[in-house]
Amino acid sequence: MKFFIDTADIAEIRDLAATGLVDGITTNPSLIAKSGRDLFEVLKEICEVVPGPVSAEVTAIDFDDMLREGRILAKVADNIVVKTPLTVDGLKTCKTLSDDGIKVNVTLCFSAAQAILAAKAGAAYISPFVGRLDDTGADGLQLIAEIVEIYNAYPNFHTEVLVASVRHVGHIIESAKMGADVATIPPAVLRAMYKHPLTDKGLDAFLADWAKTGQTIGDAGGKETRRSA
Ligand code: G3P
């Protein structure tokens, strides 16, 4: 499963990219607004830090303007993926850009029917929003299961399932069990994935026992394990 980070916060991106576990980034107009920065400036910076796919969303709502914006965004860097909304015009834009060799992430997907349309429009990624569906009382993960099943039934569909609107670690675990290709994860949720109280407790015990031995493993000079005097 690939991990994208769902943020336009460059400090968070630099910090998490250093883990070596970040495969890409997704942004949206709300995240750009939250960053308080110029869209093109922040996109360029993100693309320099993360070599993988970086999603940048169009903001127009009609086909001609979406297409124009999509082409402008695609020129920012080679790893830009243009994000279009799941509307008739958004999917027309997706089809045209995809036919031109520009990767598209179709966003705001809330049904299996919409996901089928996005695959037929040549989307590189479909972004079903699990958290926002859960918020309505529906089952966001059920949608992921349906889309994975449908896409697996059609080898000519090359669209990757990108789990979006992730709210907690359970969304990642369950999506991974279903074989979703990618999850775009808020920084706090990725950090939460590392945590387990038994890991902390076990580490504390190991370190306390180790301290009693008076030993060290090497030093700044890289020496081998030795017993201290
Ligand atoms: O970028 C799309 C998506 O992940 C939004 O998440 O938390 O605003 O529902 P959220």
Image: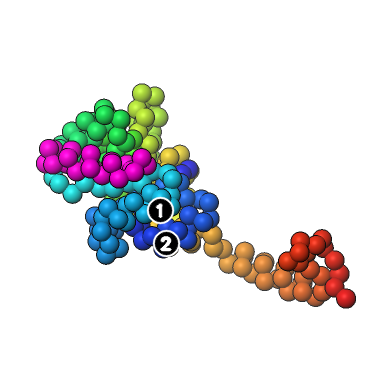
- Quadrant occupied by the C terminus: bottom right
Residue found at x 21% / y 46%: 58
| Residue designated by label 1 | 5
Q: For the residue carrying disc 1, how many other residues have a C-alpha within 10 Å: few (<14), some (14-19), or many (20+)?
A: many
Asked whether disc 1 touches disc 2, contact meaning CB atoms under 8 Å apart, the reply is: yes
Dot 1: what SS? strand
Q: Nearer the viewer, mark 1 or mark 2?
A: 2
| Viewer-closest of 110 and 54 | 54
- Which stretch appears magenta? 62-87
Residue found at x 42% / y 61%: 12
Query: Is residue 144 something one can see in this rendering?
Result: no
Residue found at x 24% / y 33%: 97
- In the rendered structure, the answer to whether residue 163 lies left or right of residue 97 reads right
C-alpha span from label 1 to label 2: 9 Å
Tell me, yes or no, whether the highlighted magenta stretch contains residue 170: no
| Viewer-closest of 84 and 70 | 70
Relative to 163, residue 64 above or below: above
Image coords of residue 59 (percent x, y): 18, 49
Image coords of residue 114 (percent x, y): 24, 37
The quarter of the picture where residue 180 lies is top left
The quarter of the picture where residue 67 lies is top left
| Residue designated by label 2 | 12
Query: Is residue 33 something one can see in this rendering?
Result: yes
Image coords of residue 169 (percent x, y): 45, 56
Mark earlier in primary sequence (1, 2): 1
Tell me, yes or no, whether the highlighted magenta stretch contains residue 66: yes
- What's the amino acid at mark 1? Ile
| Viewer-closest of 156 and 80 | 80
Q: For the residue carrying disc 2, how many other residues have a C-alpha within 10 Å: few (<14), some (14-19), or many (20+)?
A: some
